[in-house]
Amino acid sequence: MLTKRIIPCLDIKNGRTVKGVNFVNLIDAGDPVVLAKQYAELGADELVFLDIAATLENRGTTLDMVEKVAEQVNIPFTVGGGISSVEHVDALLKCGADKISINSSAVKRPELVNELSQKFGSQCVVVAIDAKKVDGEWLVHLAGGTIPTELNLFDWAKEVEKRGAGEILFTSMNNDGTKAGFANEALAKLSTELNIPIIASGGAGTVQHFIDTFVEGKSDAALAASVFHFGEIPIPELKKELKDSGIPVRI
């Protein structure tokens, strides 16, 4: 059985790691380079770096910050934020990224998923989907959750899989920052309907939430931010409890 992955997420704005609730009210959470090194040493399986202001500010991800983080980690490193071209991805990979994450740019031009998977391989392409449950339907939102669309989460996830996405990073905007648990019902549906790995994001608050998303949500990986940044759940302890609960993890 494949091991389940624990992935700290560094949301970057103005060169600092930030964290909010439901995508707003951001507070400072530390130096991303220092945090990245720390997580790699503590046993994180992967690291995600999201330049959360890049799309809103109509620019690409900051390359020098990516390079600094890449120098400090020896685990797979995914970078996202404002990525909209093959050339930009090429530059990020040369700076040390292992995978890239696209979100708004994929919705605006779905062919980008095809182009990137054909050029770099599907294992390099993560499609991030921020969705909010509105009147019983999960609707995709763009630009850091600020722009609602009529696009259905599950339909969009199936489309990007067909276009060559290697993984889906699904963030529930309803759950984000609440520490009330992941959106396991939606995650289980994604895992059942798709054949590529699903990364759960939004809502981690306790060790039990991680257990639940792997068991009930059928998630392949769980991503979290504030519980790691502020030392609420140390990664070594989390992995030990997951293993004790019968969930396969890399110790």
Image (cartoon, rainbow, N blue to C red):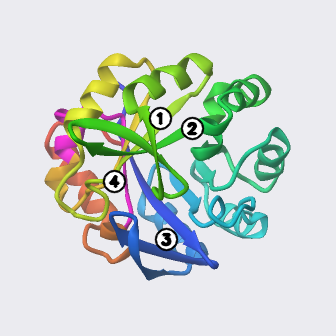
Q: Quadrant of residue 198?
A: top left
Q: Are marks 3 and 4 in contact (CB under 8 Å)?
A: no
Task: Give how far apart the Cα atoms at labels 1 and 4 are.
Answer: 15 Å
Judged by depth in the image, the label closer to the viewer, 1 or 3, is 1
Q: Amino acid at mark 1?
A: Ile
Q: Amino acid at mark 3?
A: Gln
Q: Amino acid at mark 2?
A: Val
Q: Name the secondary structure under disc 3.
A: helix
Mark 4 vs mark 2: which is more N-terminal? 2
Task: Give how far apart the Cα atoms at labels 4 and 2 are.
Answer: 18 Å
Magenta range:
211-225
Mark carried by residue 168: 1
Instruction: Please say if 124 is above or below 92.
Output: above
Mark 1 vs mark 4: which is more N-terminal? 1
Task: Give how far apart the Cα atoms at labels 2 and 3 are.
Answer: 24 Å
Q: Amino acid at mark 4?
A: Met
Residue at 24% x, 48% y is 182
Q: Which residue is mark 2?
A: 126
Q: Are marks 1 and 2 in contact (CB under 8 Å)?
A: yes
- Left-right relation of 170 to 65: left
Mark 3 vs mark 4: which is more N-terminal? 3
Q: Which residue is mark 3?
A: 38
Task: Give percent across and percent down for residue 195.
Answer: 43, 17
Mark carried by residue 18: none
Q: Name the secondary structure under disc 4.
A: loop
The N terminus - image quarter: top left
Q: Which residue is mark 4?
A: 173
